[in-house]
Amino acid sequence: MRKAILVFSAVAMAGALMVPHAAQAWWRHGPFWGGGIYIGPPVYVAPPPPVYYAPPPVYYGPAAQGGCYAGPYVCPLPGPMAAGAPCSCPTNEGGRVGGRAR
């Protein structure tokens, strides 16, 4: 009786080992009998997109409206300028005096 139980257990274990696991099922019934080598489709990895850096924003400041103030002299600006930019006005003696645009 004891021998029969051992033989039955050995046959049951051998039978359980012969049943393929779910992960091995493809290999058991693959493209070639008895298994095969699986070569998957090629994987394409696109290159990263180029990085464009924007230039920093240009800050000109508020525009001057009132003209050039150079001490006792006030004269019109020769062109568009930012407020606080250096400028100069002509004097009565023929020279120029420095000031700031307002």
Image (spheres, grey):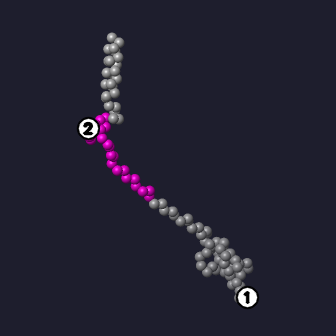
> Which residue is tagged 1?
93
Residue at the image position 29 percent from the left and 38 percent from the top? 35
User: Which quadrant is the N terminus positioned in?
Assistant: top left
Tell which of 97 and 68 is nearer to you: 97
Compared with 34, 92 (above or below) is: below
Residues in magenta, as a range: 25-49
Binning the other alpha carbons within 10 Å of mark 2 as few (below 14), some (14 to 19) or many (20 upward) gives: few
Q: Is residue 51 left or right of residue 39?
A: right
**Residue 47: quarter of image:** bottom left
| Marker disc for residue 33 | 2
Location of residue 37 in the rendering, given as x and y in whole percent from the top left corner: 32, 43
Residue 15 at least partly seen: yes
Disc 1 crowd, CA 10 A, few/some/many (<14, 14-19, 20+): few
Question: How many angstroms separate mark 2 from mark 1 (CA)?
Answer: 110 Å
Could you tell me which secondary element the residue under label 1 belongs to? loop
Q: Position of residue 78 (x, y in %)?
A: 61, 80
Residue 7 located left or right of residue 101:
left
Say left or right for 50 vs 69. Answer: left
Q: Residue drawn 51% across and 64% down? A: 54
**Up-down relation of residue 60 to residue 71 (above or below):** above
